Amino acid sequence: MALDTVNELLSFDCGSLVAYKVDKNSQLDSISFQTVLMRDVFVKHPEIVLIHRTHNAWGKALYAFMVDKPFLRLEGEMSRVIHFSVPSRESAEGLARMYRTFKAFNPEWKQIKTFLVDPRFRFLPSLSEAFPAAEVQLSVFHICKHLQHKIHQVSLEFHTEKLILSALRNAMCAPTESNLRTMHTILSEFVKPNLLPQPHKDWLLNEKIWALHCWRTWEECSQYFKSLEVLTRSLSQVFCVGPSLENCITTLAKTYQKSVSKDSLEAAPCPDTLLSRNVSSLHNLLVLTSSAAHSRRPLLPRDLPTATPQATLEPKLEVDPDQAAYEQEIEITAEEAAEQIKQSLMDICTEPAARLCLNEFAVAQNSVQLMGTNEDTVHIQILEDTKAVSHSGLSSCSCHFNQMFQLPCRHILAVLNAEGKDLEPERIPAQWRKEHSASQPGQSSTNGLLEVLRSSWDESLDKYLVVSFLTEQISQLLSQCSCEEFDRRSCTLRELADSWIGPYVQVKL
């Protein structure tokens, strides 16, 4: 299996490079992958490299190396990626081996001037030892994602949270000293130190972090953040497809190849086109999703301000052992909570109900989740869809799935997972529980649904299900009303049918 995966990666082009290691079961344990196009992009733009880390639920982490420089014009988000690597273990030794592989693949590595990393980047000394001439800086993109996540954890009222996120957006897209100080004051006022330590807030006042970013216009920042958010979210979704590293890296490589092939066929937009786009939609993305800012510029039209010793990066990136242990404990707890929810669904629900809810939970696990609460509801946002979950009992949600089936949807399951709660039988309607189905043998209305869930999807089946659900809803509306209301509704339905199909076709209502 491992050898098949390696051969498939090498088949993408004649110059692809792959370094891998197998475990005792002959399965992939670590792998580094780079195509000819990735190498060409790095050779042309080697000055600044962003390292983005994505982890999955099976203990593996993907490190994506990306180029980043002023006025970088590449066709498509994925084109900025120059190297993929999955280390066997995230230890100092494992990451050092990963960096050695990157250097072996790219002899021009000495031209790297700056690395941009996450504030919680692991084993930072290994990176500095591998690239002693390169400066390591915090990524503004990851800083703002971190701050936005903390803002959502505060559980402020909707309007207050919206105003704070608007201020963060201003700091991202127009990082002037005034905007950054305003954001620092807001965070100090609303976010408690136990949730966001003071050094994290002080990132906003670190001139060395923001000086290289402030030269972008608002439109350029918005487009840049949108592009980077789309890329990192795509990497996360692809890498979390399953426990098999072979399948993950193959899917990732195919996604990359498909993306760059598609982008190469499309003309790159000119700067005027980028600047003339509707910025309001980009603002909405930055506020309502996990968007954040990030950029570095080694070439500037004027000298940079000199950073004071207190503003240097190294002390702020040291990992506190207690904090690292706490983060590891949180990760383990989240994984155990997810398994508890899955097991509860299998124990409580009938098979059709369990399948429906597990599909919803899979979407919730592989998606970006932003939550805020007020007195009555929990506002849960999965990607771009925001729904309201009832805070009392977590039994109802405003989404279509919950309203139709009365089962825990992805939004309710995401809240349970985030709060580490178990699924209780009271949250499942009686007709979906196993004991109800067992007490009424032969009378279950879920057998047909189970057959549909077990079958493979096709377009005709999808249309059939839509028509069936619509027909059932219309039948209920016509049967549960007075005679006068029935006449009015049937006449309306007749007009709709005639307008869609035409009176020349006999339509039976």
Image (tube, helix red, strand yellow):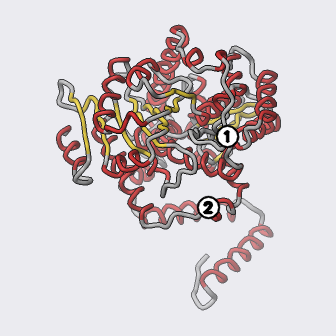
Task: Identify which residue, 209 or 498, lies in the foreground.
Answer: 209
Is the residue 237 above or below the residue 195 in the image?
A: below
Q: Residues within 10 Å of mark 1 (few under 14, many from 20)?
A: few
Q: Secondary structure at mark 1?
A: loop
Q: Is residue 179 above or below residue 506?
A: above
Under mark 2, the amino acid is Pro
* Lower position in the chain sequence, tag 1 or tag 2: 2
Q: Total marks drawn?
A: 2
- Disc 2 secondary structure class: helix
- The x, y position of residue 155, in whole percent, is 73, 28
Which residue does the image show at 61% across and 34% down from the upper left? 140
Q: Quadrant of residue 163?
A: top right
Depth order, front residue of 98/54: 98
| Location of residue 433 in the rendering, given as x and y in whole percent from the top left corner | 51, 35
Work out whether residue 199 or residue 55 is closer to the camera in this orientation and state it: 199
Residue 369 sits in which quadrant? top right
Residue found farthest to the top: 322
Q: Which residue is mark 2?
A: 271
Asked if 147 appears above or below 125 in the picture, the reply is below
Residue designated by label 1: 302
